[in-house]
Image (spheres, rainbow, N blue to C red):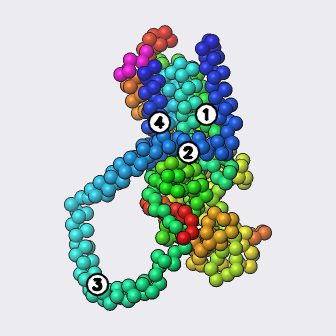
Amino acid sequence: MIFFFCLLVIVLAAQIVELFIPTLPWLYNSHIYIVPVIVFYGAMALPFPLMLALALYAGILLDALTVQVIGGKVEISMGWSILLYAVLAGIMHGLRPLFIRGRWEVHCILSGIGTSLIILAQYLMITFRRGSLVFSREVWWQIGGPGLIAMAMAPIIFWLLQWMGRMTAYPYLNERTRFE
Amino acid sequence: MNRTSIIALLIFGAILGYFLTFGPESTRRFKAGVYRVIAPFLTSGSGLQRQITSVRTGLKSLEQLERENASLQVENRELRATNKGLRDVEHEVNRLRHALNYRERSVFKLMAAEIVTRDSSTWWHTVTINRGKEDGIETDMAVVTDEGLVGKTTTVSEKISVVLLISDENCKVAASVEGTREQGIVSGERVTGGLNPLLDLNFLSKQADLKPGQKAYTSGVGGVFPSGLLIGAVKNFRVRELDGQAQLTPAVDLSHLEDVFVVTGRK
């Protein structure tokens, strides 16, 4: 449980840090997203109810800090990010046995894909509201770029969170024996 | 799936359903509440970021310093020479400034603000500023710099406000072009690849034939933006099937904003 609360604090801190990270001009102004990687780690490390709680928390934060209310209209209503996080975290949770066996490769790749899917879903939703579907090179890079960065960051973040799990005596190793 | 998971799923569904029913006003209130909670982190984070940036820019190699020193000495000699001439000009400028009484002429009440964070997400072009309801800021107030229009406030919490930049597709500004009777709507582009985005001035007449460099100002139509604020300069003009469209270079460098003014009213 301590580990879960640590994850909540880390998600909040990462969400705030994201606001200060400048975009990458050499990657078509792509943003760097850290929170999805943490949430996906939580999805694999936590039991199902806590995974849902983490997705709920991260989704609320994402909606509250990014979605804009302009001229009395909301382009993406509150709650959609929660749903997105829950679905993607649910998929990651399904691959939990593999993760517990120490096979992280698939999850690192999926973290990147999941990050890009969140941004793609946001883009499709705002496009639905604004009209005229545009898929230029910039759009693809702004969707795919953060995914690639998340993929590259995932092993380091996973390793740090794994280390933190051990420090907080999270009962991870017990489950490993159970799966083996 | 065990009983705990089913109960968790039901609770999750109920909370999700609750959030999905939020309308614009409840969303805005909720966002303002979250910003109120994290405002101390944002303001202290902004200060920390400035310190880190100043340290990073301050670190230079010996070779760089030598080069800089040599160029500064040359520059110093040049400046001494021009300084003599400028003393005469200064006297004249002071006289003219006094005559114009610039401050007295200004019709707006301006509230100075600092940029705390910028571009929080991929698809919305926003910045947050360190002013909020406590400073008299409200939703849909124009934000400017001495160079021109920056955007408008959207979500306002006690100490922090979100500003939607004119480079955002959703920030629509009624504009007129200097030296013509042309009027149109300025909006940003949905996706921009570079740091300096361009603006689109739509719904011009096909005969507008605007020339590069012509300036576009707010026309005051719509009520959010007062008239006469510089938006940008025409970069190019093209005729479309139904109307004319000009691309504008924003008057303000939106990628390097540090200090802005919120127009809180007229004097």
Residues A70 and A39: in front is A70
Say which amino acid is labelled 4.
Leu
Q: Are marks 1 and 4 on the same chain?
A: yes
Q: Are marks 2 and 3 on the same chain?
A: yes
Identify residue for label 3: B83
Q: Are marks 4 and 2 on the same chain?
A: no
Say which amino acid is labelled 1.
Ile
Q: Which tag is nearer the camera, tag 1 or tag 2?
A: 2
In the displayed structure, would residue B251 be above or below residue B166? below
First of labels 2, 3 by sequence position: 2
The CA span between labels 4 and 2 is 16 Å
Query: Which range of residues does the magenta coloring cover?
Result: A166-171
The CA span between labels 1 and 2 is 19 Å
Disc 3 sits on a residue from what chain? B
The CA span between labels 1 and 4 is 15 Å
Q: Are marks 4 and 3 in contact (CB under 8 Å)?
A: no
Q: Disc 4 on helix, strand or loop?
A: helix
Disc 1 sits on a residue from what chain? A
Q: Which tag is nearer the camera, tag 2 or tag 3?
A: 2
Q: Which tag is nearer the camera, tag 4 or tag 2?
A: 2
Disc 4 sits on a residue from what chain? A
Q: Disc 2 on helix, strand or loop?
A: helix
Which image quadrant for residue B172?
bottom right
- Answer yes or no: is residue A138 visible: no
Identify residue for label 1: A82
Q: Disc 3 on helix, strand or loop?
A: helix
Q: Residue at x 61, y 17 (%)?
A: B5
Q: Main SS type for the magenta part?
A: loop
